[in-house]
Amino acid sequence: MGAPMMTRPLTLADEARPTPQATIDALMYALRGGLAAFDDPSNLDRLRRCYPHAMRQVATRLQDWKGKRVAWLPVWPDDDIETLVKLWAAVRGKA
């Protein structure tokens, strides 16, 4: 495994900026592997950097995967989406 990631606490100034779409897209790509994606610290960091609007987008996209019916796109059970939201709150220090 690589060197540990350096993270700084998020500030109110950070909250005023939207989450970069590239961060959301990278997280969505990783989430194709389910909750195991968070075994990789870089995915935890991406999750931590998601602001509320981005987290709503992620959860909505995961729910939309249920209707896609393509082999490479996993169906996320509601319980796993709930676990993801709880993990997001925990890594952002809001739990």
Image (cartoon, grey):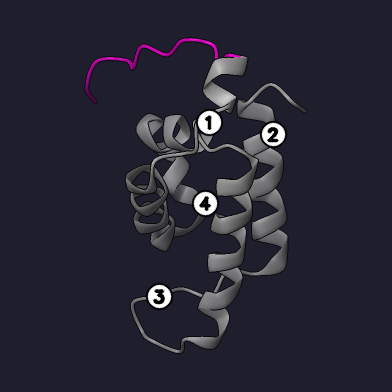
- Label 2 – label 1 distance at C-alpha: 8 Å
Badge 2 element: helix
- Tell me the distance, in whole angstroms, between the alpha carbons under discs 4 and 1: 15 Å
Question: Mark 4 to mark 3: distance in Å?
Answer: 14 Å
* Quadrant of residue 7 within the rendered picture: top left
Query: Would you place residue 50 above or below residue 35 in this image?
Result: above
Q: In this view, does 90 lie above or below 62?
A: above
Point 57% across, 27% down: residue: 16
Q: Residues within 10 Å of mark 3 (few under 14, many from 20)?
A: some
Amino acid identity at mark 2: Ala
Q: In this view, does 25 lie to the left or right of 80?
A: left
Q: What residue type is labelled 3?
A: Leu
Checking the image for residue 48, the label placed there is: 1
* Crowd around label 4: few <14 · some 14–19 · many ≥20 (10 Å): some
Considering the numbered disc 4 on the image, is that residue within a helix, a strand or a loop?
A: helix
Q: Is mark 3 on a helix, strand or loop?
A: loop
Q: Position of residue 26 (x, y in %)?
A: 33, 49
> Does the segment drawn in magenta span residue 10?
yes
Q: How crowded is mark 2: few (under 14 residues within 10 Å), some or many (20 or more)?
A: some
Residue topped by disc 4 = 35
Q: Position of residue 11 (x, y in %)?
A: 58, 14
Mark 4 or 3, which is nearer the eye? 3
Instruction: List x then y, in percent, for residue 6.
Output: 36, 11
Q: Mark on residue 73?
A: 3
Asked if residue 88 lies in the magenta stretch, the reply is no
